[in-house]
Image: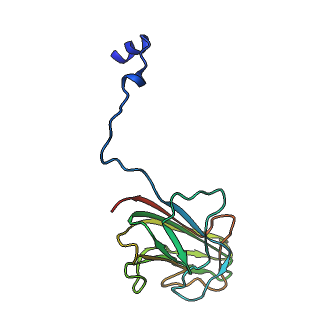
Amino acid sequence: MTLIKARSRGINLADTFAFTGTVSGAGGGITVAQQFRLAADEAGSNSTGTVFTNFEENDTDYQALGSAFTQSSGVFSCSQTGVYLCTWTVTVYGSSGGDGFDPNIQISTDSGSNYTMRSRMWGHTDAATGHSTIGTSFMFDVANTSTFRLRFRQSSDNDIGNGTTIKGNTGQNFTQITFVRLGDT
């Protein structure tokens, strides 16, 4: 009831409840958000473990927030420690005989000497279904930027056949990966 009376008297509530102090422990919000995509179509490798290599940072109606991730030959490095959310998708099409596949992401904490699979999905495409898009998300911690590596692979156990096309495009996102820094470790 006091609030209603205050309004009826013309009191400016913004002035009445203004805060001029400092809040300790408050974060600065998201500091990194970057997106990369396969820049052109590529044929399935017909071999397990093939790393996607033709990435570009999105440049269509896009503005990165920060710049922590870079990639070379499909291996991503990170220049800022923290907890990250990674989302990714793979789009394939064109298999006449049917093609099952399991794209995945692996992380290394020893400069790429050893990798551990962190995220994997299973998909299937054939002439009847045409395109197939699969993807997922996961969180990870970059504790040491000098030894952290991440790679995005076509498959682990079930290769994408060379009769299947992996969709990429320099003007749209089909096969893509996004990184968002959620906060400190």
Q: Nearer the viewer, residue 136 or 87?
A: 87
Give the residue drawn at x 35%, y 33%. Answer: 20
Q: Nearer the viewer, residue 18 or 83?
A: 18
Give the number of callouts. 0
Q: Quadrant of residue 143?
A: bottom left
Which quadrant: the C terminus?
bottom left
Which quadrant: the N terminus?
top left
Give the residue drawn at x 35%, y 60%. Answer: 184
Q: Nearer the viewer, residue 154 or 128?
A: 154
Q: Quadrant of residue 129?
A: bottom right
Query: Outermost residue toward the left?
Result: 24
Q: Position of residue 154 (x, y in %)?
A: 55, 80
Query: Outermost residue toward the bottom?
Result: 47
Q: Vertical placement of 142 versus 46: above or below?
A: above
Q: Quadrant of residue 177?
A: bottom right
Query: Outermost residue toward the top?
Result: 9
Q: Position of residue 19 (x, y in %)?
A: 35, 31
Residue 1 in view in this figure: no
Q: Vertical placement of 159 versus 59: above or below?
A: below
Q: Position of residue 136 (x, y in %)?
A: 48, 66
Q: Position of residue 4 (x, y in %)?
A: 39, 15
Give the residue drawn at x 41%, y 10%. Answer: 9
Residue 49 in view in this figure: yes
Identify the coloring. Answer: rainbow
